[in-house]
């Protein structure tokens, strides 16, 4: 079974330890090496990228290392691939999500 690493108990994403195909179950390991959940990947997720551990709504904070690393620019379902196509910087908006109106 594919593995992902949860770095901090506050995190809502984990880092996959190998390429993951859509439909594959992923064992998420705590820092102590215990399996804390087994989400099914909704998308193909490349090695080193993030998998969502909970449903994230547009505007929700993405948390890794126990810290906010970005903001969801679209809704992301649990098991979804979390990367620059659906997350932007919390400090410097990089997509239409953070732009002012017309």
Image (cartoon, helix red, strand yellow):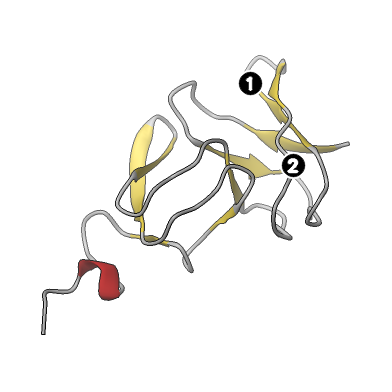
Tell which residue pokes out farthest to the bottom in this image.
102
Q: Secondary structure at mark 2?
A: loop
Q: Is residue 29 left or right of residue 67?
A: right
Answer above or below: position of 99 versus 92. below
Q: Position of residue 19 (x, y in %)?
A: 79, 55
Question: In the drawing, does residue 102 fall left or right of residue 50?
Answer: left
Q: Are discs 2 and 1 less than 8 Å apart at CB?
A: no
Quadrant in the picture for residue 78? top right
Q: Decide: few, some or many residues near mark 1? Use Cα within 10 Å; few <14, some 14-19, many ≥20.
A: some
Task: Give the CA separation, mark 2 to mark 1.
Answer: 17 Å
Marker disc for residue 21: none
Q: Disc 2 vs disc 1: which is toward the camera?
A: 2
Q: Is residue 69 above or below residue 99?
A: above
From the image, tell me which residue sits under label 2: 40
- For the C terminus, the quadrant is bottom left
Numbered mark located on residue 30 in the image = 1
Which residue is rendered at x = 70% and y = 58% of the image?
Answer: 43
**4 or 76, nearer to the observer:** 76
Q: Residue at x 35, y 35 (%)?
A: 67
**Residue drawn at (52%, 60%) of the image:** 83
Between residue 2 and residue 59, name the one nearer to us. Answer: 59
Q: Earlier in the sequence, mark 2 or mark 1?
A: 1
Instruction: Name the quarter where the N terminus is drawn.
Output: top right
Query: What residue is shown at x 49% (from left), y 21% (from top)?
Result: 9
Q: Position of residue 38 (x, y in %)?
A: 74, 30
For label 1, the SS is: loop
Q: Nearer the viewer, residue 48 or 99?
A: 99
In percent of width and height, residue 11 lies at 47, 31
Crowd class of label 2 (few under 14; some 14 to 19; many from 20; radius 10 Å): some
Q: How many marks?
A: 2
């Amino acid at each position: 079974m594919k593995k992902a690493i949860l770095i901090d108990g506050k995190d809502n994403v984990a880092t996959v330890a190998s390429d993951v195909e859509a439909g594959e179950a992923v064992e998420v390991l705590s820092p102590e090496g215990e399996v804390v959940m087994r989400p099914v990947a909704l998308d193909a997720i490349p090695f080193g990228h993030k998998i969502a551990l909970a449903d994230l709504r547009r505007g929700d904070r993405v948390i890794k290392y126990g810290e906010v690393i970005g903001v969801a620019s679209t809704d992301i379902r649990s098991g979804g691939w979390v990367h620059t196509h659906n997350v932007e910087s919390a400090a410097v908006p990089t997509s239409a999500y953070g732009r002012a109106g017309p």
